[in-house]
Image (cartoon, coloured by chain):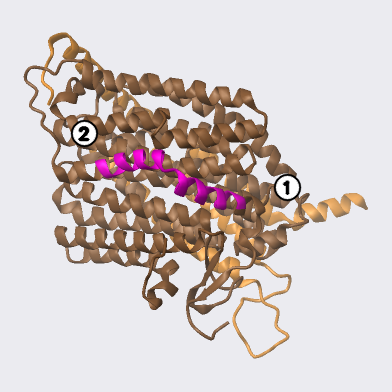
Amino acid sequence: MPLLLPEALADHAPMLAVLVPLLAAPLAMLFGNRAFAYGISFAASVASFIFSMFLLARVMDGSVLSYHLGGWAPPLGIEYRVDAANALVLLIVSAISAVVLPFARTSIETEIAERHHTLFYACYMLCFTGLMGVAITGDAFNVFVFLEVSSLSTYVLVALGAEKDRRALSAAYDYLILGTIGATFFVIGLGLIYMTTGTLNMADLAQRLTGLESNRTLRSGFAFIVVGMGLKMAIYPLHRWLPSAYTYAPSAVSAFLAATATKVAIYVVLRFMFSVYSAKFGFERDTLQLIIFPFAIIAMFAASIVACYQINLKRMLAYSSIAQIGYMLLGVSMLNVTGLSATLVHLFNHAVTKGALFLAVGAIVYRTGSALLPHMAGLGRKMPWTSAAIVIGGLSLIGIPSTAGFVSKWVLIAGAFERDAWPVAVLIVASSLIAVVYVWRVLEVLYLQPAPANSTATEAPLGLLIPTWILALASIWFGLDADLTVSVSRTAAEALLNGGFGGDAAIIMGVEGRK
Amino acid sequence: MEQMTTLTFVLGHMNYWLFVVLMMTGLYIVVARGNLLKKVVGLNLFQAAVFMLYISMGKVAGGTAPIFTNNPAETYSNPLPHVLILTAIVVGIATTALGLALIVRINETYDTIEEDEILALDHATAQKEIDAVAKLGSDGGDVK
């Protein structure tokens, strides 16, 4: 996949992928013009997407890129380090952002007061910047800074849902409290690591940590980081903020967050578990097998069962997200290349699937004003295209063959068999059957129940349908042609399990000559 | 003699003990208090504890403030944790400001900033939704 960029842009692609949306944020707000704000945000997302594609194409063979900010060499200077794992995450985040923005342009008309639209775009861009930054940076403290950039704007984005439902405010507040506790735990963890090693550069940390397996400060640092990021990614018992935040946020925000925010948090945990610390650490293996593994299994079942009882479709999808995070963590806890690549494949496939589902629900909310299941009776005939997208997303969520969800579950089960853990494979299939129940509930309401006689719902406008269908078709495409996702994930998983953040990296410098 | 060394160890790490106490106090307030404003105060204490952790570890025995002088023999404290924590302070202020702004909005719409009252109101709203939907099932009401 040769992707050509002018040399000046190619050299600075890692920086530009983050910088462009960061600059778009104040510009979107500055002129107070909605069309301009939308235009510049969309352009920035597309630009970031192109840079991410370019980066992924360059690291697909397993090489590592290192970009020194301002030409200051690491470990003193801040470094952006790109390998297959974070290039994949960058691609997901920027692609979803570029797809969701056109949807947001139409959907926020009914959900957010007009005077707040430019602010919405600014917050959205900041959130996007933060997520990209977290994924690309090779500096541990930089992760925290970008994490907070994205989190703070996420709280605002969720609270914007208060226009329609005041519960968005309490949801945003809960998210703020728990998110801040998570981020602060993360900083404490970083502090403990810094205390022992005196460095914050991830590649440098990896080197200095070898041989310190029995150091207690490092162990508690690891615990703080895992719990802190666990809060951000809604790992099973720490998921309390997620359902309300996704339910009451504006539709476009729900779709964007569900597809990206938790995924980036998972990426951070992977990075710390395998690149900074490594699987050689006994306490890490114990954490994965004795704590993460059971919680992942519980999440797969408990969250799926809770999802079956929801009458709000958005809340049902939110609970389903918690279950899907269980699958991703299950892949990590297998500690083999196949399991880890299942995590990364699912990261990608679930982003596409959940994005499509949340967008389709957003289109229904746009037309009927309600996300409650009983209000959707008979919409299968009134809104055929939107409903069809829900069908595709639902099938992919279950993991029916020829959808993206099937590919990730296939790889996950292969990982379980590699470890001779066939009961785990059975559990994966069993929990997928629960997904059949809640997806069927939605399909039954949409297609088998008669529409109320006075229903005036009509098909959603094209501005909403096109983004929804891009993601719906993508979740079929990546189910049929899984070569790209699986091979990139495998490269990434191998690199992660090797540890050390890639060793020698191809250095692309910011400023020439200063080393 | 051994007791003496334990005592010096305990006293010598006073900053860290205080960090633990302050951190747990803050976390306890966040979890245990029902008043949204008090939760934010607790969150602030919790974050302030982390500032203390970082600044403690930057201290070099006998070191002065890390300001460049022409004397090469001068010992400095490690300035990096200070810089890191400046960033964290800024983040903390932004979080507090946003938290307070949300509380103002919550107070406007809910008329209370007590967590259990807000929960009760939210539950009432949810119950109303369920009732309305149940009614919809019986008389096939309006979709809008």
The residue carrying pointer 1 sits among few (fewer than 14), some (14 to 19) or many (20 or more) residues within 10 Å by Cα, namely some
Magenta segment boundaries in residue numbering: A469-494
Q: Is residue A268 above or below residue A432?
A: below
Going from the N terminus, do you reach mark 1 or mark 2 first? 1
- The residue at which mark 2 appears reads as A386
Whether residue B100 appears in this view of the structure is: no
- Estimate the x, y position of residue A288 in percent, counting from the top left: 64, 38
- Estimate the x, y position of residue A106 in percent, counting from the top left: 16, 46
Amino acid carrying mark 2 in the image: Thr
Is B62 in front, or is A421? A421
- The residue at which mark 1 appears reads as A281
Rendered shade, chain B: orange
Residue beneath the point at 64% across and 41% down: A336
Rendered shade, chain A: brown
Whether residue B72 appears in this view of the structure is: yes
Q: Is residue A276 above or below residue A331?
A: below
- Residue A265 vs residue A439: left or right? right
